[in-house]
Image (cartoon, helix red, strand yellow):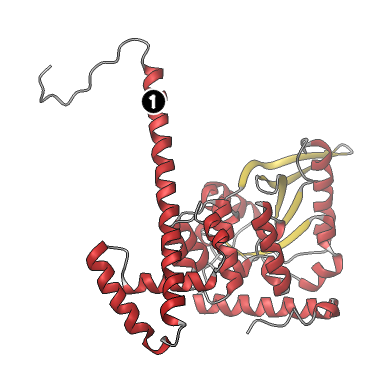
Amino acid sequence: MSSGSSSRPALPRGTTVLLRDLRDLIDRARGEVAKQVNSALVLLYWQVGRRVSKDLLHERRGKYGQEILHTLSLRLSAEYGRGWSLPNIVRMVQLAQQVPDAKIIATLSQQLGWSHFAAIVPLRDPLQRMFYAEMCRLERWSVRMLRQKIASMLFERTSLSRKPRSLIRRELEAVRDQDRLTPDLAFRDPYVLDFLGLKDRYLEKDLEDAIMRDLERFLLELGSDFCFVARQKRITVDGEDHSLDLLFFHRGLRRLVALDLKLGAFQAADKGQMELYLRWLERHEQRRGEDPPIGLILCAGSRQETVELLELDRSRIRVATYWTKVLPRQLLRRRLRAALLAAQERLACRQPALSGSARPIR
């Protein structure tokens, strides 16, 4: 064979498996090296931010801070190249100030790259930053996905965000310590289903068909740990057949999730129907090691007082709305903020002892 030939030599008999195993070893080693380099870079940037914050900005030099940062950026860029721009150094300082605990940074840096931190650091609310960092670590979001989640206001759409701030922090700290999601983190309200392309008028079957046609994007909106199990799951009780619209399994929660679609607003009768599904699934489908199934009733509209009076949490049932059209970001923000304030006010009325910590977010 000529030295200029681009064809690969034929493999001797019996070496195919050997070559595959060697490739796996090389790819795993490369992945580990990249992971270590990424972690070291994040820790370096955090240390730089801490040193700059402590030695230059906090010791009577605050008014010269921007000038000092600009000078540092020019010098470090000239000596070390990319990565030392002024915005990047500002992010390093912000990260060190927001997360002063080196152990937390070391843990997060095992999964999050610097680009992840650069997307999280500008968020104003410390609970938002904590939420996105922990969810990103647990669900291994790409930078692109993280930015999409932030843009869609995922935190504001979770059940967790409607709790008092002290309880939000406590639950996020528990997630960090236990590496396990809770239903309040896994479920959200509303779900944005604009990608289904539904017209102004449609039937329940049209909604279900649209979900099945674009199941991958629907799963992304539900959350990365959701796995599709069945459509129109047949449930027979006393010789009568019932059909559950969609059945999923959530790996993080380790439980089945029964999803029932409703075109209108939530009705009190929907609770009984879902309770029947959950009891049947618990008896016939739940496997050893799994937690009891949980239900999600997805409606076009919500009736909050009805939901509260029925105390659906005690029945492992969640109710959420879905939107088939994208709202302008400012309108989305106003609606979600109004929902948050209303939830906090209701919680303050129900639990006077928590009213101090359930004050509205300013």
Q: Quadrant of the N terminus?
A: top left
Q: Which residue is mark 1?
A: 22
Residue 268, image x, y percentages: 83, 63
Q: Quadrant of the C terminus?
A: bottom right
Front-lying residue, 328 or 210: 328
Residue 108, image x, y percentages: 53, 57
Quarter of the figure with residue 240: top right
As displayed, is residue 165 above or below residue 113? below
Q: Horizontal placement of 279 versus 40: left or right?
A: right
Residue 169 is at least partly visible in this image:
yes
Q: Horizontal placement of 23 versus 177: left or right?
A: left
Quarter of the figure with residue 118: bottom left
Residue 338, image x, y percentages: 65, 80
Residue 299 is at least partly visible in this image:
no
Front-lying residue, 89 or 130: 89
Residue 185, image x, y percentages: 66, 60
Instruction: Assess disc 1: are there few (<14), some (14-19) or many (≥20) residues with their C-alpha within 10 Å of its C-alpha.
Output: few
As displayed, is residue 320 above or below residue 294? below
Q: Residue at x 13, y 24 (%)?
A: 5
As displayed, is residue 324 above or below residue 275? below
